[in-house]
Amino acid sequence: MKKKIVGLMLLLTFAVSSGCSGNTENDVSEQQSADATSVSATPTVTEAPTPTIVEKEDSLATLEEYLLGSGLLSGERTEMAADMIGATSGFKYEDSYAEIYEFDETSDTYKNLVETNSVTLSDFNMTLSAVSINGKYALFASGDGQPGQELIDAFNSYSLL
């Protein structure tokens, strides 16, 4: 009698497990088929983020930020007495041997600078030659050296597009 009960239990266990596993395989197969259909039927489109356009003011501070960001200005920053050479503002970085000034493009001093590539410090009877002029900005040598060519090239290529 024990053998019959054990056999019957095994038979029931086998029948139940066969029935469940068959349904599971069908369910998995149907789910995979549904997933494949849904993937091909509705592709996911990822939109690229819209770039934010930031307009920058054309100023000496923006030029300085550009040159600092390029790693071309170093050392201590000194605000210059720009009015002594007829500029509206200016600064220098002694370690980079650079003085940069902003000029009023309608001024006689600026027009003379563009024409002669120099400005005169009348109070000191001294003439300073510009290393480069880019629009309303002028780059001069500071101290006992000259700005590096990389700094000059970056200064010349600066513009707000």
Image (tube, grey):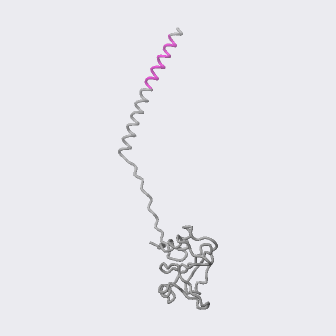
Residue 6 belongs to magenta span? yes
Whole-percent x, y for residue 91 in the image: 59, 78
User: Could you say where residue 59 lies in the image, as x and y percent from the top left?
Assistant: 52, 77
Residues 89 and 134: in front is: 134
Instruction: Identify which residue is drawn at 49% across, 81% down.
Output: 136
Is 46 left or right of 130, judged from the image as shown?
A: left
* Residue at the image position 58 percent from the left and 91 percent from the top: 122
Give the residues in magenta. Answer: 4-20
Query: Can you say whether 125 is above or below 55 in the image?
Result: below
Q: Nearer the viewer, residue 56 or 83?
A: 83
Horizontal side of 3 relative to 28 (left or right) equals right
Residue occupying image coordinates x 61% and y 81%: 80
Q: Main secondary structure of the magenta part?
A: helix
Residue at the limit of the structure toward the top, as seen here: 1
Q: Position of residue 84 (x, y in %)?
A: 59, 87
The correct choice, above or below, for 145 with respect to 104 in the image is: above
Residue at the image point whose x is 49% and y is 13% from the top: 7
Q: Position of residue 106 (x, y in %)?
A: 48, 87
Q: Quadrant of the C terminus?
A: bottom left
User: Is residue 61 magenta-colored?
Assistant: no
